[in-house]
Image: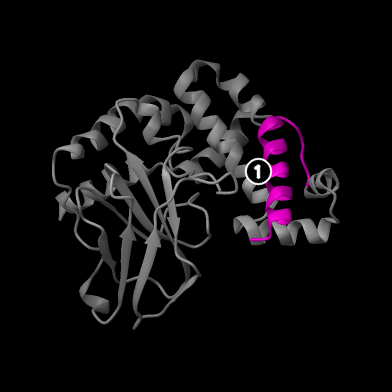
Amino acid sequence: MNKEHTAAVEKAIRYMKDHLDEDITSGFLASYVGYSSFHFVRIFKNVTGISPCHFLSALRMEAGKTALLQDPSLLMKILLSVGFRSPGSFNTRFKQNVGISPRKFSIDSLSLSSYVRQYEHEELQLEEHRSNRSVSQQIRCHIEAPADFRGIIFVGLFTHPIPDQKPAAGTALNGKKRTCTFTDIPSGTYYALAAGIPWSLNPKDYFVLTHSLRGKSLTAIEVTGHSNLDVHILLREPLDVDPPIVINLPLLLFEQKERNTAK
């Protein structure tokens, strides 16, 4: 990436993080970093994969999650601090991006983190995402993680290069497993994204993933009913320009295990 462009985007992201309670426009950010609006938006997308507006929304959800884990009783103060003016709009956006309401998120966080931690010492067995309807389709994801990594790896196929909605398909890997296969994926364009969360006794570390390893496919993946693809993802330390991981990954794991058990 162009160092000058990256530096400008990093400067804009720092401003967003420090002023989440303000009305921030792409035009203002462009002026702040010294670019025209057109060029700034193009540069921002090239560096982060998403628009400044999309990135700002994800930062607000990440800050909201952090605050809810600290003191959920201060909901009104929390939503104002991250740029929302009404509980209704905050609840709606939070549920869209995180997967559950703010209240349920704060209530369930402790039990969900404990649920994930059990797999530090127990093999995680999840059925591959497949059905009899499309046996010819296979999307194989190969994850490369640092040799000293000890934790759980989440992998998913998302419609945008940011995990802020439920994936079309997803799974989790623990132990030494580093490969998963998806089938029966609706035709379309996807981004293979992965997150490596180190084992931790702090529940917050499973929901606010600012220090988790990141990885993504080098390009978007075009999936058809007969795709047979191998996707390689390298897990690395997070960068300042990485979009926040907004979706509730422990909840996705719990829901998938429940579906497997019900079969």
Q: Nearer the viewer, residue 66 or 134?
A: 66
Extent of the magenta region: 1-25
Q: Which residue, given by chain and number where applicable, does mark 1 sit on?
A: 56
x and y percentages locating residue 216 in the rendered image? 45, 59
In this view, 108 is above or below 191: above
In the picture, measured across the screen, residue 93 lies left or right of residue 71, that is right
Frontmost residue, 102 versus 207: 207
**Residue 162 in the image: x percent, y percent?**
52, 53
Residue that appears at 53% across and 36% down: 62
**Percent position (x, y) of residue 52?**
69, 50
Q: Is residue 91 left or right of residue 119?
A: right
Q: Is residue 61 magenta?
A: no
- Left or right: residue 244 compared with residue 148: right
Quarter of the image containing the N terminus?
A: bottom right
Asked if residue 239 is positioned above or below residue 108 in the image, the reply reads: below
Q: Is residue 23 highlighted in magenta?
A: yes
| In the foreground, 55 or 216 | 216
Judge from the rendering whether residue 169 lies leftward or rightward of residue 27; answer left or right. left
Relative image position of residue 182 (x, y in whole percent):
29, 67
Residue at 41% across, 46% down: 213
